[in-house]
Image (tube, rainbow, N blue to C red):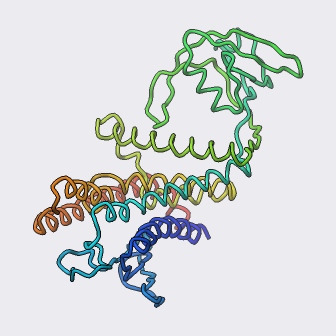
Amino acid sequence: MNFIIFIIIVGILIIVHEFGHFIAARKSGVKVEKFAIGFGPVLFTIKGKNTDFLICLFPLGGYVKMAGENRLETKGLADEFFSKPVLTRMKIVFAGPFFNYFFAFLLFWIIAVIGFPYIEPIVGKVKEGFPAQSAGLKEGDRILSVNGKKVEHWLDMTQLIRESKNSVFLDIDRQGQKLSLKVPLEKAEGGDEFGRKKSVAVIGIEASSKVKIIKYNLFQGALKAFETVVGLTVLTIKGFFYMVAGTLSPKDVAGPLGIYYITSQTIKLGIVAILNLMAILNVSLAIVNLLPLPVFDGGHIFLLFIEKIRRKPISEKTDILLTRVGIAIIGILMIFVFYNDIVNFGSKIWGKWF
């Protein structure tokens, strides 16, 4: 069952992405010959009026085949990809990642409206010898605000504490009694949002197991969804930057096996968690596709941008060379990612099977 749900989730990601290309091409007057989900041998075909819809053996990908998208096969017809202006072609290419972004926004909006479980800012344990104990914090205290800023859940609270210097002012609710405490900060080894070890400010408390559902109205939900998409985008781009800079190991990147394992664990948490994972994967897919590398959508957009400046496309020889380089890069990345997945997740997945 986990594998079926994983295939469904990946299939939805692909369909959303390729549908973006499909609808933009059709709206721009470009004929779409094939709409394929997966790669490799075709399992079955649905014949449409103008487009053949294919389901292929290997589900980790897909493509939209447009008339005249290969310059060597163009006939100069009006409904061909290369017959359209540069900006129109850029719009068609960009539509795939854009649809992934838009779908992620819709999913986060739904989640915000129906509610998502958060750990409540309630003290579950006060560690001995830490500032919280000497300041008088007790198990069961609900933290209402940090330095005057209201907190709704545990992550809000920890983030505000980590951003503070020397000490924090906490407003707490202790069995209906409102109290204010000044708590000194202490440095301890922790991790950032990428799991990198670093010294962080702590007061010495642990969360309780209590959770609450936070819901937003439609307008608030839309704002929250937009904020989440932007936040994820910034976080992902920072991650790429740190990997290039060498401060974040590429081994922390999950591929198909890693996503399968994460999916199998997420399924246990319910439909909201699954929707959240789908939204995150859509944002990730959009960003990866926008990287300015050959074969990726970002690479095509970059070449179209060059064509717009030069007022003529790059030579066919250069185009073929870049395509081959892009395929080689993707091949190397796939080998690395699969190897990395086997090392990180292989025993967790196959240990359940054998």
Q: In which quarter of the image is residue 249?
A: top left
Name the side, left or right, on which 62 lies relative to 117.
Answer: left
The residue located at (29%, 40%) in the rendering is 244
The residue located at (50%, 66%) in the rendering is 16
The residue located at (71%, 45%) in the rendering is 117
The residue located at (25%, 72%) in the rendering is 82
Q: Which of 303 and 150 is in front in this view?
A: 303
Q: In this view, does 8 lie above or below 155?
A: below
Q: Nearer the viewer, residue 97 or 136?
A: 97
| Residue 21: % across, % down | 41, 68
Q: Which of 10 and 79 is in front in this view?
A: 79
Name the side, left or right, on which 106 lies relative to 70.
Answer: right
| Residue 57: % across, % down | 42, 80
Q: Is residue 108 above or below residue 256?
A: above
Q: In which quarter of the image is residue 41?
A: bottom left
Name the side, left or right, on which 177 lies relative to 105.
Answer: right
Q: In which quarter of the image is the N terminus?
A: bottom right
| Residue 282: % across, % down | 50, 57
